[in-house]
Structure formats: structure tokens, C-alpha cells
Image (cartoon, helix red, strand yellow):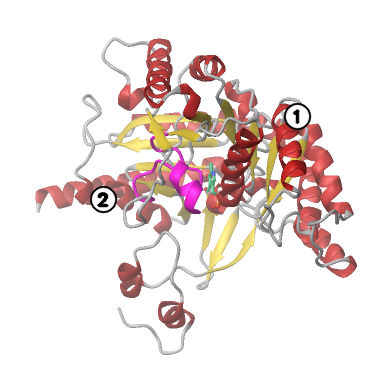
Amino acid sequence: MSFQPNSPAARDVAYFLHPYTNAKAHEEHGPMIIERGEGVYVYDDSGKAYIEAMAGLWCASLGFNEKRLVKAATAQMEKLPYYHTFAHKAHLPGIDLAEKLVKLAPVPMSKVFFCSSGSEANDTVVKLVWYYNNARGRHAKKKFISRIKGYHGVTVASASLTGTPVNHPGFDLPLPGFKHTSNPHYYRFGQAGESEEQFATRMADDLEKMILEEGPETVAAFIAEPIQGAGGVIVPPKTYFEKIQAVLKKYDVLMVADEVICGFGRTGNFWGSQTVGIQPDILSCAKALSSSYLPISAVLMTDEVYQPIAQGSADLGVLGHGYTYSAHPVCAAVALETLKIYEERDIVGHVRTVAPRFLERLHALGDHPLVGETRGRGLMGALEIVADKATKAPFDPKAGAGALAYKAAAEHGLIVRSIGDTIAFTPPLIINNSQIDEMFDKMGKALDDALAALKKAQAA
Ligand SMILES: Cc1ncc(COP(=O)(O)O)c(C=O)c1O
């Protein structure tokens, strides 16, 4: 494709290496340029409106033009645009946000460490857990177990935790000491005649087997998203986390909840941990913490985790970890305002009010000839496209069924996410019932278009 010389598209292709993009395909197709946003809609540079069914990257919870967040950022910029928090320095937005997060936590937490992204938060988790075990003299207890298709970010340690197919090849990852246990997707991996509860027992048995094979004295922590997001919106089977946590307790392995997507109301409770019954020792969060208007993330830890870390820092003279932007005051001010808005507008109550419509409309797409499974909780859902509903057989990846549905959705003015042949929906939490209807009406049409295209390709 040739681009108008010096146009934004031409300059994008000339200068910009995009994350999570096939660079060669990008040179050919160019970018989709989004120019502005309003509520749950974004507009491209031709003025076309799209309902943003993913809230960007599962994150812009308050939609795309919340003026109060702009004001909060501006006010903080004018007062103190930057200061750091190293070496005993502090500022009010950081202090207030730490206190607020501890008060909101799903279990009693003691301290908060701030970073700028979900990946940095999970990297920090890895380092703090290593530090914690060193401080306790347990120098061999360092391994992390995550799940196949779990997503925890892309920095070196976070990418090692991540278990999705594209994050290791080409990068010499995962690092040693990062293991991936079974994926708890009942529809795909449940065996014939196995109930959800039996499947959950088998998943916990797999974890126990892995811990025993590795040696419990070498396994430090297990990390999981309450509901797996980027791995395909996998809702855990009934009793899953209850059984998993019993295994972790038995072998003195920490439970880390990655709330980067699920936190702040997404699943119909303030925390995903509350929805699925996780009692975390450590919790990481990001994204909706600031409605993603500015980058900020946080790691919360219990006092049992904090105390050895504090002692370790005293023994070594300093906690040798921290970022220039840890608790950045402008980001912290925007996060505080976001949390205030969640409370004032009862965003969790709103999610609970509209979630039944969201889930009803999502599950209704299960009748479409292309759809094998629909799944979701709160305002987090997905449908899985299959070639054969009865056998659950997927399409040949070369058919690009998910990509076809994604493209057709965009043509109808709907931005979704295709994860292979799974289509995900996590709209801004402010979405209303009529926008939910609009979203799924468009998706129904997109599935019809994808089916027609697949049939045409098969006939050719
Ligand atoms: C559950 C989860 N953890 C961590 C991350 C990484 O966050 P970031 O992209 O901000 O580094 C993501 C990103 O989507 C995520 O979904």
C-alpha cells in the first residue's frame, strides 16, 4: 500500500515500531489512527465512531473524556508536577493513594509499592518475593509458578511469568525458575464426564505435582489473574481457587493476585479476588487504577510479607529497588480522583446493574453457528469461534476466523480484541444498557460477515 507523502500514516510507518504488531504487515497496511474519544466511543481520523468494547487495553474504565481526571492532573501539575519518593522523600498524593489502596484491599494489607505499569508491578513482585525469602534465609525458595496462557506483562521477569504463546519465542524467555502449570479452561481442557469441580481438583493436583517435582523448598510463589484476560477471558471453574490455595498453604507458597485487569469493579466486585475467592499475600494492580489516563501501578503486600522485607532492607542498608516514577505525583493524583469517582458514582453498583444485560447479550451470541462457547463475569466476557460446535474443533489458524470477525466488527464501528479465535469484550465500566445492545448488535453482524467470508474461502 502506498501512503500519501508526509501523511500521519506515512510518518507512522516510517518512524514508529508498534508494540504487539507484525512490523512487516504494518508497513503494508499502515495504522488505524484514533483521534479523539467521548464516553465509550473513540473516533478515527476520518471521523468514524467506534464503540470501544475493550476500553482500550481492558483499562479506560471511565471512558474517553472524563473531565475530572483532566482537572486533577492539571491541578497537580501546577502544584508539584514531579517529585520522587526515594530516600525518605514523600508527597501527599503518594501518601493518600497508599492509604486509600490499603483501606480498599480485599484482605488486610500493610504496604504499597508504586510503579508505572502492570509489567513493572509484576517484576517488582518477583524481586520483592526473592528479597523476602533471602531475608528469611530461605535462599533456595525462589521459583514462580504461573499458568499456561496467564498474562502478567512483558518485562523480563513479567514475560517469564506470562504463559501466552507469543511472549517467549524470539526473546530467550522464560528465565530459569519460572514454571507454567495447567490452564483452567473447562470448555477446552475438561475431560469427557468430568464435572467442573472434578476439573478444578485435577488442576490443583497438577499444581501440587509441579511443586513436588520442583521441590517445595524451591517454590516461592504462585501468580494468577482472578479471571485470565489476555489468555482468552478464562473464568476459573467452580472451587478452583479454593483448591489451589489449599495446595499453596500446604507448601508455604505465596499467593499473588494479578488484579491488573480484574481490579476496580471489572468483575462485579471491587476486586476480582472477591469474585473468585482469592486471599492474596501480594496483589498487583494497574490500568483502571487511574482509568489509564496516566500510567501508574501498585503492589500491595500483607504485613507477613512486608516485615521480612523491611528487616532485609535494614540488614542491607537500603531496599535497592525503585523507579524514578514510583508514585509519580500527577499519576497518583489522577488515581485518587479515579477512586473518588468510583465511590461517588458507585461504579461497582453500576457494573452489577448492567452486567446481567451484558452477559445475556453475550450468551445469546452462543446461538450463532460460529460460536462454541461464551463466558464472562461482570463486564468481562468473551466468545470463542469454532469450526464445529458439536466437537469444539477450532478452525485452521490459517483461516484467521478471529481476525475476520475483528475486522468485520471494525467495519461496523466496533473495536473488540481477537485472541486467536476468541473475541473479548471489556467495555468501559460506564457503559449503559443501550450501548451494550449496540455493541452486541454490531458483533452479531460482524459474526455473520465472518461466517460468510469463511464459507466463501472454503468454497474457493
Ligand atoms: C493481568 C495483566 N497483568 C499485567 C499486565 C501488564 O501490564 P502493562 O501492559 O501495563 O505492562 C497486563 C496487561 O494487559 C495484564 O492484563
Stretch of the chain drawn in magenta: 147-167
Q: Position of residue 346 (x, y in %)?
A: 77, 35
Q: For this view, does 126 lie left or right of residue 177? A: right
* Closest to the observer, 401 or 262: 262
Which residue is farthest bottom? Answer: 5
- Give, as a three-letter code, the residue at label 1: Asp
What residue is drawn where x is 75% and y is 50%?
318
- Give, as a three-letter code, the residue at label 2: Gly
Mark 1 secondary-structure assignment: helix
Q: Is residue 342 above or below residue 249?
A: below
Residue tagged 1? 303
Q: Which mark is residue 400?
A: 2
* Closest to the observer, 44 or 367: 44
Mark 2 secondary-structure assignment: loop
Quarter of the rendering occupied by the N terminus = bottom left
Q: Position of residue 102 (x, y in %)?
A: 79, 35
Asked if residue 162 lies in the magenta stretch, the reply is: yes
User: Given this view, does label 2 or label 1 mark the residue nearer the observer?
Assistant: 1
User: What distance separates the C-alpha of mark 2 from that of mark 1?
Assistant: 48 Å
Q: Report the predominant secondary structure element of the magenta stretch.
A: loop
The answer to whether one can see residue 154 in this image is no
Quarter of the rendering occupied by the C terminus = bottom left
Which corner quadrant of the image does residue 213 belong to?
Answer: top left
